[in-house]
Image (cartoon, rainbow, N blue to C red):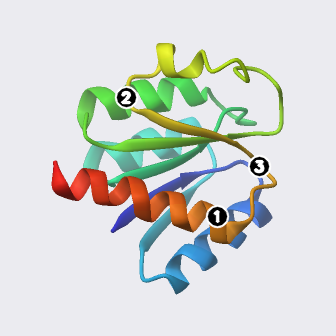
Amino acid sequence: MKVLIVESCAELGQLWKRHLERHGMDVVLRHTQDDAVSYLSENEPQIIILNLVLADGAALAVADFANYRMPKAQVIFVSNTSFFSDGSIFAHVANARALVPTGTEPEDLAAMVQHYGREVDSA
């Protein structure tokens, strides 16, 4: 399963990347909107783990580009803010599947990736 992680914090992104790789996933880590969109221009991950608050760029622009280019890709948003905690992210982003805190255990994140990845595979 191909996974793209878009996370500004290199240490957190690497933690998630290593954990997902231990589960046999093909994982790419990008830190900015531009780098993520560049990757998405030439690749088609099944799952995108995307921090809502990027230090460089806009997460919603990444999600929108992904939805346009590969509508079957599933987006798992992570955030350390209460913004969109009312669930409105699902009204704004058609391919959003979850919004979890950045402190979510890597094992739980891996379980979500596996779950939503199966949805893409069966579609």
Q: Looking at the image, which residue is at 50% across and 22% down?
A: 90
Q: Are marks 1 and 3 in contact (CB under 8 Å)?
A: no
In the image, what residue type sits under mark 2? Phe
Could you tell me how far apart the alpha carbons at marks 2 and 1 are, in whole angstroms? 26 Å
Measure the C-alpha gap from mark 3 to mark 2: 22 Å
Q: Earlier in the sequence, mark 2 or mark 1?
A: 2
Q: Which badge, 1 or 3, comes first in the chain's sequence?
A: 3
Q: Secondary structure at mark 3?
A: loop
User: What residue is at 43 percent from the left and 39 percent from the top?
Assistant: 37
- The mark closer to the camera, 1 or 3, is 1
Left or right: 89, with 38 as reference point = right
10 Å neighbourhood of mark 3: few (<14), some, or many (≥20)?
Answer: some
| Front disc: 2 or 1 | 1
Q: From the viewer's perspective, is residue 97 above or below residue 23?
A: above
Q: Nearer the viewer, residue 47 or 59?
A: 47
Q: Which residue is mark 2?
A: 65
The amino acid at mark 1 is Asp
Between marks 1 and 3, how big is the CA–CA gap? 11 Å
**Label 1: which secondary element:** helix
Q: Position of residue 101 (x, y in %)?
A: 76, 44
Residue 95 appears in the figure: yes
- Name the element at disc 2: helix
**Front of the two marks 3 and 2:** 3
Name the residue carrying label 3. 102
Q: Which residue is mark 1?
A: 108
**Quadrant in which the N terminus is drawn:** bottom left
Query: Of callouts 3 and 2, which one flags the residue occurring earlier in the amino acid sequence?
Result: 2
Relative image position of residue 78 (x, y in whole percent): 67, 42
Amino acid at the residue labelled 3: Thr
Q: Tell me if residue 50 comes above or below residue 118 in the rendering.
A: above
